[in-house]
Every structure is written in C-alpha cells, then in structure tokens.
Amino acid sequence: MTLAGSGVDMEAGGAAAGPGGAAADDEARCGGRFVEDWCCACAGLLAGPNPMMARYLYALIFLVTNLLAWTLRDYGNSALDELQRLKVCQGARYCLGAEGVLRVSLGCFLFFFVMFMSTVNTRKVHECRNSWHSEWWPAKVVLWLGFTVVTFLAPSPLVQLYGKVAHFGAGAFLVIQLISVTRFIMWLNDCCQSEVTRKRCHLQIQAVSIVTYVGSLLGIVLMYVWYAPSPACKLNILFVTVTLVLVQLMTFVSMSSKVKAGYLAPGLMGIYVVFLCWSAIRSEPHTEICNKKAEVATSADWVNIASFVIAVIVIVAATFSTGIDSKCLQFKKAEGESEEDDIPYGFGFFHLVFAMGAMYFAMIFVGWNAHQTMEKWTIDVGWASTWVRIGNEWLAAIVYIWMMIAPIIWKTRQVGSSAET
C-alpha cells in the first residue's frame, strides 16, 4: 500500500518520449530521480527544510501514539497508577482501557488538525509554512505531548463525544484509503497496457495477471473451507459468496469490449477485496463457532502478537501512503506541469489524513465500540469491526467499477451533447 503515493508521483513525472528511446529515457529519468531524491533527503538533514524527510518523522510520531494507546489499553492498570490521582479519571476508570485509547487518539487528532490548519493551501517551498512543516521539531514534539497530556484533563463526556465523532472520521479515512489503492491499481494497469511496456514485458504481465486472478479465486475457496465449514455458517457463506460475485463482476466489466482493461486490474482488485473479506471474517468475535482460525489464534500467543504487530505497522503504512497521495481525490487531471519550487505533496491533505488516521486507530483498538472490553494483543475484533470491513469491501468494488465505466459514460454524454449542437 505504500506504493500508492509513489505511483501517483511516477504518473505525474512520466513523460512521453520518442518511440525509439522511450524506455531507455524513462529508466534513466527514474533512476536519476531516485538518486536525486535520496541525496536531497540526506542533505536536508544537515541544511534547509526537507518535506520529504519530514513525512517519515510524522509517521514516527503516529507510530509512537499507536503504541501509547495500546499500552494504556492492555497494560495501563499496572503501568500508570499515577492516573488514579487525577480527579477527572475517578480512580483511573476514565483514563485507561477504551477511554484511555480515545484520549490518546484525541491528542493525536488535535496535533495533526492544528498542523492541517497551519499548512493547508501551501503551494511553494519558499513559503514560511514549508519551514513550519519540515522543521521546528522540538516545538512540534512539545505541542504533540501537550495535546496528549491535556486530553487526560478533559471530562469524560467530551471524550465520549469524540469517540462518536471518530466513527465518521475513521469511515472517511477508509474511503480515502480505498480510493487511493484503487487509483494506484488502475494507474499500474494503464502503465502495463502501454505499447512500450507490452512489447518488453508481455509475458510477465500475463503471468502476474493470471496469478493474481487465480490467487483471488483460491483465497475464496480457502475462506469457504476455513470459515464456512457447515451450512449453519450462513453469514460467512454470504460474505464469501458476495466476494466471489464481486470478483467476477469486476472481471466482466474490465474485459468488456468498451473497457478492455485486461486481467491485471481485476486480478489485483480481486486480491484486495478478498483480503478485505478475510479480515472482516477474522474480526468476528473469537467465540463465533464458524471462526475456527480465530480459536487457533487465541490459543497461540505468538500468533496473536505477530498479527497485532503486523496490524499496527499496516495502519501506519496505510496512513503514510494515503497521506502523500494528495491527488487521489482529483478525478480530473490537472492542467499544466508542476514547477521546481512547488511542494512535493499536499501538506494540508497529508496532515488531514493523519488526523483521520488517529480516529481510525482509536476505532480499531476498541473494536468500533468504546463500551466493549478488548482482549490483550487483539485489534479490530467485534461485530461492528466485521461489518465496517465488509462495507469497505463492497464500496471498494463499487468504486473500481465506477472508475472503469465513468470515462465511457462521460465520453458518451460529450458525444451526445456535441451532436445536438
């Protein structure tokens, strides 16, 4: 998923060369840009604002916040006895567990929202807001810590209100994320459909297309075996069957005579929606009789711990990749070329995505329900989590199909309107 942002950057930077040396020119240009970016990143540590390196530091702050929220949820009672002295915590009742997660999330949200308000509409690297975004780290660390501490002085009703609002912010984050992933898959498919790429890598593209498509079907078969072992598992059968229908529908639309997108895009999207369906079923409560794999996970501590660590890394990586993909919501190509003094990515959008990501990690740490108790080393478990992921899967398929047929619809309308005039 971290490729989403880089895919957009490559799309913006790739230019059409002559038919003879297009491939060589593109490789030289991409290689030169890679070396230049890393050299600039290393040099930026010593002198001048460096927005490319700054994004990694923001991701580090976000990761530390996730770990702090997890610590409060799973080990807060033994590690933070000092919270019992705060009146607002009422013996740490309102500062640990699920509400502790919400308080840490609120502090993270406030920090990135302030950064969003102070950097939105930044256009050029010479603006002072670029310096604020890329430098002043001691001040920003103090600001982040200050917001985190202040949230533990906030009254419980305010924190609970934030928890309700966080449902919508987390939902918006998921929508932006799936749009970013879908756009990257379509961009990758367009690159592979180009004449130069097809001549050079035709067999490789066909192999990847077949592997992804067959892999998505294999994943569906395995979910039937693992999560729908008997006819009594009607809900899991429904989830997996709808996923199978969506994969076939996306393939049919992509292979239609008007679209002609090939097998690569539906294969990659098939893998994506199968993963979403699998994660949704895995989010079902561990007491669910049809979720045998969840019972195995709870009986082996190392499996739970490994799954939790991977999940946290995925959260940070997904937030990072979506944040730097500021063009994912631009459904029309921008006119004109970027200038040398333009910022490399949208600072405001970057911080807004991290602010919504703060709401998202709060929701998955509490299972989208602040009133339920989560087991240690678990993440995104509960029926609310299951239905959120299923809805995300269905919406991803709808967005993909719309992105495939929308250009045809717009073109038909333009032809019709020109014919009338």
Image (tube, grey):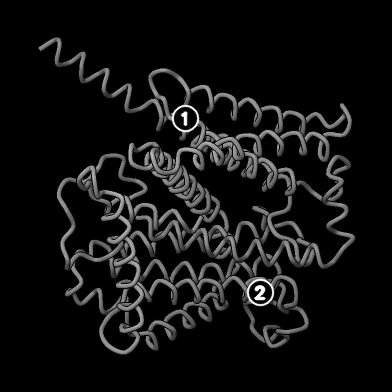
Q: Is residue 365 left or right of residue 269?
A: right
Question: Which of the pair 136/402 is nearer the observer?
Answer: 402
Which of the 4 quarters of the picture holds residue 123? bottom left
Q: Residue shown at 25%/74% (left/top)?
A: 130
Q: CA distance from mark 1 to mark 2?
A: 53 Å
Which of the 4 quarters of the picture holds residue 248? top right
Q: Quadrant of the C terminus?
A: top left
Percent from the top left, x then y, of residue 398? Answer: 49, 31
Q: Amino acid at mark 1?
A: Gly
Q: Is residue 298 left or right of residue 342?
A: right
Q: Residue shown at 38%/42% (left/top)?
A: 197
Q: Is residue 125 left or right of residue 152?
A: left
**Marker count (numbered):** 2
Badge 2 density bin: few <14, some 14–19, many ≥20, Cα 10 Å: many
Q: Which element type, helix, strand or loop, lies under badge 2?
A: loop
Q: Amino acid at mark 2?
A: Cys
Percent from the top left, x then y, of residue 61? Answer: 49, 76
Percent from the top left, x then y, of residue 241? Answer: 70, 27
Read off the residue under disc 2: 95
Q: Is residue 324 left or right of residue 357?
A: left
- Residue 262 versus residue 343 in the image, above or below: above
- Residue 331 versus residue 252 in the image, above or below: below
Q: Residue shown at 49%/45% (left/top)?
A: 178
Read off the residue under disc 1: 262
Percent from the top left, x then y, of residue 133? Answer: 31, 75
| Disc ID at residue 326 | none
> Residue lying farthest front?
20
Query: Mark 1 or mark 2, which has the lower sequence index?
Result: 2
Q: Residue shown at 27%/88% (left/top)?
A: 47
Which of the 4 quarters of the picture holds residue 66? bottom right
